[in-house]
Image (cartoon, helix red, strand yellow):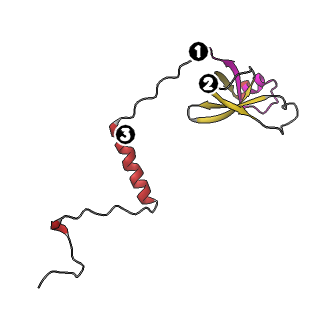
Amino acid sequence: MRICKVIKPLVSTNRIPGFEHKHLKVVQDGSSHLVAVDAVGCRDGDWVICVGSSAAREAAGSKSYPSDLTIVGIIDHWEPPPKPPVSASSSAQASATSSATSQAAGAPAPSPVQTPGNQTSGSGGGAG
């Protein structure tokens, strides 16, 4: 079983026989959006309990239904755990990774910083 949040209904007018009147919902499990058969009459924004595999087919009404996720309960009260804060070191690491990725993807490399001691002339040398 897993806890998901109902995002919105999913409308599908063409379905297999026997599955025409089942309500479908888009649910969110972490960062993934999934489609679930609604066996309990939930609403958008509800936190729900979902089952998968053969339990999902049976909960949807028949083992012959092609459901791999079915909503079987509405949670009365649920507060998801807070997301861990992003540390400064992981932010810097993500920035460095992003910079390296963009350079590997063909983005121009940043220009080197020139100081008065390392400037070169275009003529190939100084006064002789």
The numbered mark at residue 5 is none
**Circle 1 crowding by C-alpha within 10 Å: few under 14, some 14–19, many from 20:** few
Residue denoted by label 3:
90
Q: Give the distance between the C-alpha atoms of the residues marked 1 and 3, in whole angstroms.
A: 33 Å
Amino acid at dot 1: His
- The tag earlier along the polypeptide, 1 or 3, is 1
**Dot 2 corresponds to which residue?**
2
Disc 1 designates what residue? 77
Q: Secondary structure beneath disc 3? A: helix
Is residue 57 found inside the magenta-colored segment of the image? yes
Residue drawn 56% across and 31% down?
A: 30
Q: Quadrant of residue 67?
A: top right
Boundaries of the magenta span: 56-76
Instruction: Tell which tag, 1 or 2, sits nearer the viewer.
Output: 1
Quarter of the view holding residue 53? top right
Asked which quadrant contains residue 77, the reply is: top right
